[in-house]
Amino acid sequence: MSNETDLVTSSVEQLAAKPINRRKVVAGMAVAPIATSAIGGVAAPAMAATIDPSDARINAYKGQYALSGGKIIDGYFAQPRGKTNLNVVLVMPKGNALDAETENEVRRHALAGYLAIAPDLKATGGALSLAGRDAMIADMMTALPGLKKMAHGNDHLRIVGAEG
């Protein structure tokens, strides 16, 4: 037992005796976020990759989804193929309508294991589109309880903004 303690003590003393090179420490810190994102399942550069809409790992479609209470969401929907009990991610588009970047982000979230939705705010909001983006977003926020209860969802919901 004392041999193990002596070994640990001598290793710590050796480390303490070495001078610290600030440049090496900072360089190591710069690598840490990249390594962490790679360990998390999807490396950061891969998140920027374009996912084919017909990718066999996901189910993706543009259409409508009726929520309880009569609210209908027009948008782009994707989820991992054959999976249920998923966290729901609402991807808010940069503009009032869907674009290719937003749809691709929905597919990336689906590959990461989420039921992802990007609403077409203009189509979903209907007459509210005349009142502006804020009114359409407020209308979408009233649909959040229904989005949490979607089929294949598990009552957990996150809202993210589309990147690009």
Image (cartoon, grey):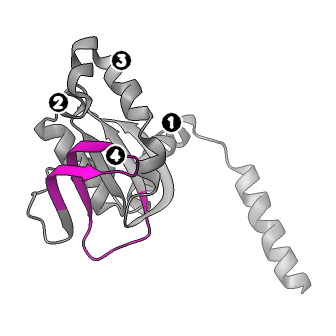
Q: Residue at x 64, y 42 (%)?
A: 20
Please report contact status of discs 1 and 2: CB closer than 8 Å, yes or no.
Answer: no
Residue furthest to the top in view is: 131
Q: Is residue 25 left or right of residue 150?
A: right
In this view, the residue in front, 38 or 1, is 38
Q: Main secondary structure of the magenta part?
A: strand
**Is the residue 74 above or below the residue 67 in the image?**
above
Of helix, strand and loop, which one carries label 2?
loop
Which residue has dot 2 on it? 97
Which residue has dot 1 on it? 23
Of helix, strand and loop, which one carries label 1?
helix
Which residue has dot 3 on it? 134
Which one is earlier in the sequence, the residue at label 4 or at label 3? 4
For the residues labelled 2 and 3, the Cα–Cα distance comes to 14 Å
Q: Amino acid at mark 2?
A: Ala
Q: Quadrant of residue 132?
A: top left
Q: Amino acid at mark 4?
A: Gly
**Is the residue 44 above or below the residue 5 in the image?**
above
**Is the residue 92 above or below the residue 116 in the image?**
above
Which one is earlier in the sequence, the residue at label 1 or at label 4? 1
Residue furthest to the right in view is: 2
For the residues labelled 4 and 3, the Cα–Cα distance comes to 22 Å
User: What span is in magenta?
Assistant: 60-87
Mark 4 or 3: in front is 4
For the residues labelled 1 and 2, the Cα–Cα distance comes to 47 Å
Mark 1 or 4: in front is 4
In this view, the residue in front, 122 or 54, is 122
Residue 70 disc label? 4
For the residues labelled 2 and 4, the Cα–Cα distance comes to 21 Å
**Relative image position of residue 96 (x, y in whole percent):** 21, 25
Mark 2 or 4: in front is 4
Which one is earlier in the sequence, the residue at label 3 or at label 1? 1
